[in-house]
Every structure is written in structure tokens, then in C-alpha cells.
Image (spheres, grey):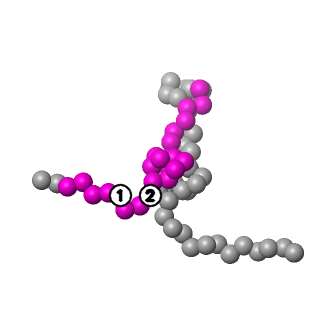
Amino acid sequence: MPENAPARVRLCPDCDGFPTVAITTGQTNPDGSRQTLTVVCRTCEGAGNVARRPAIAREVSA
């Protein structure tokens, strides 16, 4: 019998694991299908999880 294991990576708090979505614009194509935009989560950059990433060195101006 399979056992359920807890997730090893934490889901993104902003997209809740659904990093890419299609949004309808309300307009239709000549063939009758709807026009859509594909949008990626800004927080996880389309990964769906929040993995620990190395810190990015930023330049600080004085």
C-alpha cells in the first residue's frame, strides 16, 4: 500500500503551486477561440516552489 510522504519543498505562498496561468483577454480570434495571455508567478519565477537560492550580491551606492 502506498504511503503519503510530506512535500520536500515548500510551495510558493503567492501562487500556491500553480506558477503558470492562462488569462483570457475577452477578445476572440477569427476562428472563434479566445485570446489568452500566459502569466508566470513573479515570486517563484515559474518553479511553483520556494527553494533556497543563493543570495545575490547587490551593489550599494554610498
Question: Residue 45 location, x and y as percent?
Answer: 55, 56
Are there few (<14), some (14-19), or many (20+) residues within 10 Å of tag 1?
A: few
Residues drawn in magenta: 3-26
Q: Amino acid at mark 2?
A: Arg
Measured in 3D between alpha carbons, the distance from the residue under mark 2 to the one under mark 1, in whole angstroms, is 7 Å
Q: Is residue 29 magenta?
A: no
Q: Tell me the element at label 2.
A: loop
Question: Residue 30 location, x and y as percent?
Answer: 55, 26
Q: Is residue 32 above or below residue 20?
A: above
Give 52 or 47, whichever is nearer the viewer: 52
Q: Is residue 41 above or below residue 55?
A: above
Question: Residue 4 location, x and y as percent?
Answer: 24, 54
Q: Amino acid at mark 1?
A: Ala
Q: Is residue 2 above or below residue 62?
A: above
Q: Tell me the element at label 1.
A: loop
Residue 10's label in the rendered image is 2
Residue at 35 percent across and 57 percent down: it is 7
